[in-house]
Amino acid sequence: MRWPTCKVNLSREATAAGVMSAKMAVVPEGATAESRLDHQLNLFRRGAPPGSVQDIHRKHLLALQMRRDTSVWSLVPRSYILTRDPADAASEWKMFQRDYELSQCLGRLRNYLDAQAAASTPKPSQDDGLESTFDICKRHLGAHIADNHFWEGLHLSPMRKAEMLVRLVEQELPHLQLDLLQNNWWLAKPVDGAMGKGIILFGGLSCAEDLQVSTMPFWGRMSDGYVLQKYIEKPHLVHMPGLIDIDNRRGRHTAEACVDECYKYNLRMLVLVRWVEDPSVWVYDKGYIDLCAMPFAAEYGAGVQEAHVSNLPCKGKGTGVRKRMWSTDTFRQYLQECAGRDVWAEEIVSQIRTAISRALNCLLPLTTGPGCSSRDDFNSTPPVRQPWRRFGFDFALGTNFHVWLVEVNHRPGMKAPKGPAGEDKRQLLESLLVS
């Protein structure tokens, strides 16, 4: 099979993980961050070898592996692990709580500064109850920033203090991904989840103590826990009538009974990997976007999850989008007509290739051991050597066309919906088989 693809080069340099012991020993109190990371990976692998397909398929393993490369903070929304057994990921939960509280405060400061900038007459001397927010920020940031005296000895207005803190975070703590902060919303994704099942959207600017994580279900697909991933609150949206117009001009004659609304979407790209110690990677040059079932909503919560999670079905009748999958050819033309330039070729493709390369580099060296989707398979028959693997890499775009890698699937769906709704994906899959 010949794929019309672009090949991605991977570094041959292996990470420091090596082959780790299968013993689930307790991490020493003074262990380094790398030792703690190795211990967590060893624990969650449950006997699987490092560098196997499971490392990229299971969400909590991939989230931990990506921490080996500090540059991924610009590619992957930061994530934490939540398991049924608090002892398994106690340090993860503590890190998340600190991050959540700091993100909550920084979100308030960002909103405060935006409101001041938009006001016709800013009030720089007004406190607006920000002193407690400043204290929390100083307490958290003091552990990370060497010069942590901040505004000691200076008489600054609340607005100047807010500007100073936000600037410090941008310069010194890029891993906090300040661009993603607005109202501090997060996604809880089941480790072995699929098709959007079990995803919980939670957060806001409420206190960290108000998080009701104890009520999350831990059964079925959720039995192995969740990945808590920062939600991209300012996604790039597509205007449905614009897509329909392009489709009709391309001779599709698409007729949609939908409102004049904008939708969030997920970008799926297919990747072929020769899963050996010295891997080769090919990215198929076409993909598709999958629109959410409902128009994007500024509000959050369980009642509007279909507006934020793209692979959830529409619960209502007659209100959702019938055609949700659109080819990247149509998407590329849509972006070009909106921006007046070829955004797909100039910005998006290079970011996609970089994210895929970095994700796989974090797993090196790859092993041709069991490439299973469940831990029970490791105790069954000996694995068959299958060096060729197809993956589905899922991306989200920000309003500035920044590409974020949000998920990887080792068994991407190779079926399309029936009728006109699945036409674009069906043509993509047919081109894969005949090319």
Image (spheres, rainbow, N blue to C red):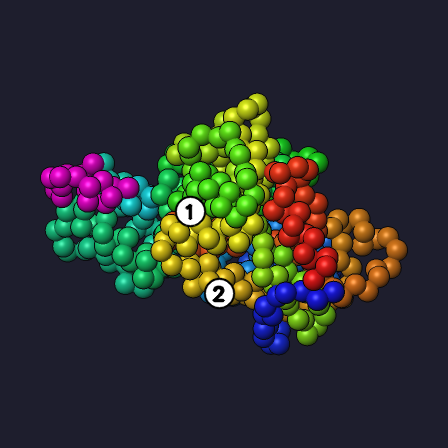
Residue where numbered disc 1 is placed: 236
Residue 124 highlighted magenta (yes or no)? yes
- Return the mark for residue 260: none
Image location (x, y in percent) of residue 235 = 42, 45
Q: Quadrant of the C terminus?
A: bottom right
Mark 2 residue element: helix
Q: Residue at x 70, y 49 (%)?
A: 414
Structural crowding at the residue carrying mark 1, measured as other residues with C-alpha within 10 Å and reported as few (<14), some (14–19) or many (≥20): some
Most foreground residue, 290 or 373: 290
Image location (x, y in percent) of residue 274 = 71, 67
Residue 414 highlighted magenta (yes or no)? no
Q: Height in image: 315 above or below 376?
A: above
Q: Quadrant of residue 13?
A: bottom right
Q: Height in image: 338 above or below 22?
A: above
Amino acid type at circle 1 is: His
Q: Residue at x 32, y 58 (%)?
A: 170
- Return the mark for residue 350: 2
Give the magenta part as a residue range.
Answer: 111-128
Q: Height in image: 178 above or below 262?
A: below
Q: Residue at x 15, y 56 (%)?
A: 153
Q: Quadrant of residue 252?
A: top right
Most foreground residue, 434 or 173: 434
Q: In the orientation shown, which residue stands out farthest toward the bottom?
A: 12
Q: Residue at x 54, y 53 (%)?
A: 328
